[in-house]
Image: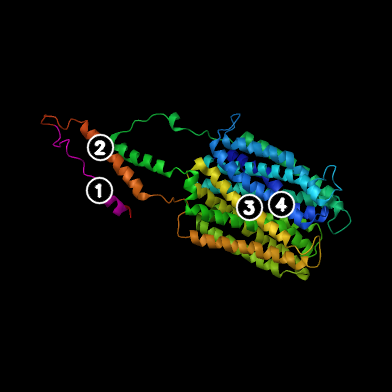
Amino acid sequence: MALKKVQRFTYSVGHVLNDLCASMWFSYLLIFFHQVKLFNNGLAGNLMLIGQISDAVCTPFIGFESDRTSGILGLGKRKTWHLTGTLSVLISFPFLFNKCITCENSPDWAQFAYYAPFVVIFQFGWAATQISHLSLIPELTSDEGERVGLNSLRYAFTVLSNLAVYLIFWLLFELHDSGSSKLSIADAPKFQKLVFIVISIGAVFSFIFHVGVKEKKPVSLDERPPTTLSDSEAGSSIEESVISKVNRMYVTCWLKEPQFYQIGGIYMCTRLFVNVSQVYLPQYCVESLKLNKKIIAIIPLVVFSSGFVTSFVMRPLNRKIGRKATYFVGVIIGISACVWLYFINKSTADQVYGAAVLLGVGGSTMLVTSLAMTADLIAQNTESGAFVYGAMSFTDKLSNGIAIEIIQQFHPCVNCCPACVPYYRTVISTIPGSCAIVGLVFLLILLPQTIGKRRKDVVKLMKDVVATSNEITNERINTSGYDSDDENSPLLSKNKSINTPPIDQVERNAG
């Protein structure tokens, strides 16, 4: 059944607050602490690592609890966690881009201790909002096309949110020019104004989501109305009930599924490609290419504009050539962008716009398709959908935090030096490019498989079907008067059983 347009729209805007904050977090946190607050590179990396680890730890816990809880205030379990996350983000994120209250002139380690708790609260809230929002997709619709459509719309608003951040930031640079082409402490008010604008816009869209999206109330087996089956329906009903029981997925079941790890690897590599390039592209532009500071708002704008356009062709492209072929196309485009970025230098700096377009197209294609693969993996097992999304996000957050921490620790200097020129060029080309290649390896492993097909014990399933069928058939025989002396009764003794295939034959047929 197709979703209403209002339902699609209100669902799609439910992640806008997260998207706006994530855009600032990945694009501007390091550059704000590094070039505006003049923080040590290592401490700035540690701050982001704490955030990513907090997110990674909270994510599976929230996913597990989100599947178990029933919700409060009639919101439903997913919307309850969404509201909790939204409030946590609203009260913590603004502190990260403002001066340290009463400790602005303190040593870096003291300011680090001040900012760290706000990072943890923000990442908890971000994880709660993300997991609950993603977990709603399989519950809102079981149609694969609708799921891809929701993922595409969701990503479209992700791109629009990023575009809004970069466009607003560019306007702030234009309206409040400090007279210098380099970032400095004089640009701190621009970051402060941006974060308050972001929080305000996100709060409005979160309100729209909670008003417009109606979460379905799960129906337990005890609440379902009793049904009477005819003899012709009994056989198929037996098999369907057995299959339904076998296919129910718990946490331990997912941990035994090879596709759980394969698609998790694809999602992790995709997020590394998108996030690492988002973090270091602004620094690549101002340090390696020596462009004007306004480029930190303009070049991400180009990346996400191309990604926004690409998101609209994801649904028809997935239908036309399939998930795996679409992801392959995204990988090739993404690797091409990384190679191009490596060969750009100061004299050819204008080419960065073309490479940024490819980066946006490749990242958008890979991300939308990997999310669609995850929804296909969950399929009808929405009872544990939040755990799956939580586990995927766990690998994403942890790997991103570790990667950025390693990059920061290997930084050639405390602030800036000539060695930064080749360093950021190497980072922006090799790290995302390598992640795309590893994602391609996972895709090749997944290639001969059908996404969402469970690795179940087929022999056990067939045994259960045969055993249940025998039991009901024999019960009907024993209660139908087969031992009666009536000449019209069936010529079948109760001591004779119904001919059913032996178990060894079932096993041979299953094999």
In this rendering, which labeled residue sits more in front, label 2 or label 1? 1
Rounded to the nearest angstrom, the CA distance separating label 4 from label 2 is 64 Å
Say what amino acid the circle numbered 2 marks.
Thr
In this rendering, which labeled residue sits more in front, label 4 or label 2? 4
Judged from the image, the secondary structure of the residue bearing numbered disc 4 is helix
Against 269, is 459 above or below? above
35 and 228: which is toward the camera:
35
Q: Return the disc, 3 or 4, that comes first in the chain's sequence.
A: 4
Near mark 3 (Cα within 10 A), the count class, few <14, some 14-19 or many ≥20, is many
Rounded to the nearest angstrom, the CA distance separating label 2 from label 1 is 16 Å
Check if mark 2's residue and mark 3's residue have beta carbons within 8 Å: no
Q: Which residue is denoted by mark 4 in the rendering? A: 48
Q: Which mark is residue 385?
A: none
**In the rendered view of the protein, which quadrant contains the C terminus?**
bottom left
Q: Return the disc, 4 or 1, that comes first in the chain's sequence.
A: 4
Check if mark 2's residue and mark 1's residue have beta carbons within 8 Å: no
Query: For the magenta stretch, what is the residue range?
Result: 489-509
Say what amino acid the circle numbered 3 marks.
Leu
Give coordinates of residue 444: x percent, y percent: 51, 62
Rounded to the nearest angstrom, the CA distance separating label 3 from label 1 is 51 Å
Q: Which residue is denoted by mark 2 in the rendering? A: 473
Q: Which residue is denoted by mark 1 in the rendering? A: 502
- Seen at 60% across and 36% down, the residue is 79
Compared across the picture, whether 349 is left or right of 486 comes to right
Q: Return the disc, 2 or 3, that comes first in the chain's sequence.
A: 3
